[in-house]
């Protein structure tokens, strides 16, 4: 069966996110003053051929661990559907 | 109240996603052969001060339209919580 894995990779909470800071500045300049914090990460959609949801999850988690996320700086969340 | 808006910005389905293609190649090289398609977009978390959920949604949608997504190449989805 074909599953879609949605992987969200975000910078760790304790780390500075310069891209987010820059976007926050841009939003303020546009007049959107009620935004107080911005954090920017990646969203990755994988199409996976797998026998069941568990093995799709396993493969997505492998991909995230080995390749898509840098554990020193990022956390990831995976949703399969 | 403080709301968190999660904005997912993805390249349009009909457009080539060269970053996704490169990652697909990388995953195949790692031996993850059951992945058939990869698309990569941005995930943006906004912290928003707003009176209610509707106005938070309004602000997030403003930000996405004016600044965060390029409607020629990207689609966005917003979730408020």
Image (tube, coloured by chain):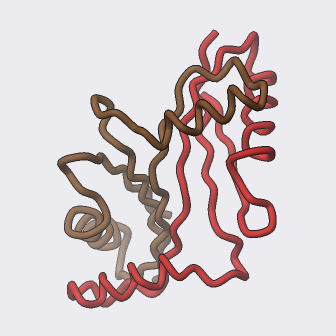
Chain colours: A brown, B red
Question: Residue B52, position in %: x, y?
Answer: 75, 15
The residue under the point 68% across, 32% down is A27
The residue under the point 62% across, 44% down is B7
The one nearer the camera, B68 or A61, is: B68
Question: Residue A1, position in %: x, y?
Answer: 46, 83
Left of A12 or right of it: where is B12?
Answer: right
Left of B35 or right of it: where is B37?
Answer: right
Q: Give residue B53's quadrant in the image.
A: top right
The residue under the point 73% across, 82% down is B14
Question: Residue A12, position in %: x, y?
Answer: 30, 38
Q: How many marks?
A: 0
The answer to whether B41 is drawn above or below residue A28 in the figure is: below
Q: Give residue A62's quadrant in the image.
A: bottom left
The residue under the point 78% across, 39% down is B61
The answer to whether B53 is drawn above or below residue B28 in the figure is: above
The answer to whether A48 is drawn above or below residue A63 in the figure is: below
Question: Residue A59, position in %: x, y?
Answer: 28, 73
The answer to whether B49 is drawn above or below residue B35 in the figure is: above
Left of B36 or right of it: where is B31?
Answer: left
The one nearer the camera, A60 or B65, is: B65
């Amino acid at each position: 069966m074909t599953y879609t894995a949605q992987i969200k990779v975000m910078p760790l909470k304790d780390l500075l996110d310069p891209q987010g800071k820059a976007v926050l500045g841009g939003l303020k300049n546009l007049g959107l003053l009620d935004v107080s914090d911005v954090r920017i990460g990646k969203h990755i959609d994988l199409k996976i051929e797998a026998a069941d949801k568990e093995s799709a999850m396993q493969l997505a988690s492998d991909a995230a661990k080995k390749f898509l996320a840098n554990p020193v700086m990022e956390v990831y969340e995976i949703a399969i559907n």
